[in-house]
Image (cartoon, grey):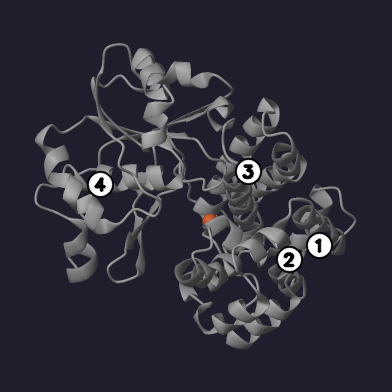
Amino acid sequence: MSNWAPTGWDWQPPGRVIAGPGCLARLGELAPERDILLVTSAGWAKRGVVQRIAAALDGARIALYDRVTPNPDIDDLDAALPVLRQSPPALILALGGGSVIDTAKALALALPAAGWNFASHFRAGVALPEAGALPILAVPTTAGTGAEVTPFATVWDKTHRKKHSLHSPALIPRGVLLDGELTLGLPHATTLHAGLDALSHALEAVWNRNANSLSDGFALQALRLIFAHLPAVLEKPDSLPDRAAMLEASLLAGCAITQTRTALVHSMSYPLTAHLGVPHGLACGAFLAGVLAYNRAADDGRIAAAAKALGHADAAGLAVALEDLLARIGLPQELAAHGVTRAAAESLAGEMITPARAGNNLRAAGPADVLDILRGTLI
Ligand SMILES: [Fe+2]
């Protein structure tokens, strides 16, 4: 018996989303503009995909910005602005993983605002630009962040070791292409870490105070796909159906967190990334089982309902299935390989409560609860 009653929503979806292997060839349908800035990482230019994009865009002028690095830095972005503003594009096309899409979003916001830069915004409090952002098309090449549908972009002030979030409806891409063929060559570790991020988004949307019917529907379908296809794609990395399913799951989980934001797992993950350099999705994966156990004690029916929707008798069945999944995909070994020990995590426990994230969690959590959860996790 569930005591949870969803209460409505406010959702701004991307303009158009096309999913299916090979759909990159349909890029022209989403991009009538003739001046396009392609934001990507250097590897994609080498692999010939940029040429395929040029063919799909049929004569459009394409400028290339391929200096994206993992966790985009605000000083790097500011250094690029004057050059890119000399020939402003009409559209920004992002081809890559979360860092590429976040960089594209940041540039879309900054380029039309002459004289504005990230350093003065984040270090001196200058307001976000009032001028409209450029439209964005997103072609994700990893299956995890969901950045292609969210209004958020994460950027870093590496000088001051700070993580910042840009948040604006203008950052929601106008169009998205999910082409599983682009993820076929992803390395095992990237596939695993991104998949854990998508899994974390879906679960965090379920055990979230902001959950509603939309987020719950998106999250449950993402979970069905992830439980079925994440182990398979790790075992058979050349399997296009599994790759395509994970890309869809990532987008659906991203839609879920546009409604709910993330919760306690993400809050606890950030110190592992900031201090130990643990990749984001892996850092989240470390706490999934522990936070599920913690939240089950305060379940108002929504976790049990999710468990049933996934074919389990009750929330305990979901917990068993989650621990099986995490063991099967090698989470404990991957955490150990990144130096994540229980002692290391406990030493960072004091930084694991970020109110903007942890405050969304179904069950309130403070520093003592975090220590309890750490004792119950896989690590
Ligand atoms: Fe995440």
State which tag comes first along the sequence, 2 or 1: 2
Q: Amino acid at mark 3?
A: His
Which amino acid, mark 4? Answer: Leu
* Residues marked 2 and 1 touching at CB (< 8 Å): yes
Name the secondary structure under disc 1.
helix
Mark 2 lies within 8 Å of ligand 1 (Cβ measured): no
Confirm or deny contact between disc 1 and disc 4 (CB under 8 A): no
* Distance between the alpha carbons at the discs numbered 4 and 2: 37 Å
Label 4 secondary element: helix
Badge 3 marks a residue whose secondary structure is helix
Q: Is residue 287 above or below residue 256?
A: below
Q: Residues within 10 Å of mark 1 (few under 14, many from 20)?
A: some
- Amino acid beneath label 2: Ala
Q: In percent of the image, x 63 and y 88: which residue is there?
A: 368
Which disc, if any, is residue 296? none
Earlier-in-chain disc, 3 versus 4: 4
Task: Check if mark 3's residue and mark 2's residue have beta carbons within 8 Å.
Answer: no
Name the spot of residue 125 as percent of width and height, x first: 19, 69
Q: CA distance from mark 1 to mark 4?
A: 41 Å
Q: Quadrant of the C terminus?
A: bottom right
Residue lying at the far bottom in this picture: please name it. 368
Q: Which residue is mark 1?
A: 319
Instruction: Identify which residue, 90 or 100, lies in the foreground.
Output: 100
Instruction: Identify the residue under disc 3.
Output: 188
Q: Position of residue 127 (x, y in %)?
A: 19, 62
In the picture of the structure, the residue carrying the numbered disc 4 is: 109
**Mark 3 neighbour density, 10 Å: few (under 14) some (14–19) many (20 or more):** few
Q: CA distance from mark 3 to mark 4?
A: 33 Å
Please name whichever residue, 176 or 154, is drawn nearer the observer in this view of the structure: 154
SS of the residue at dot 2?
A: helix
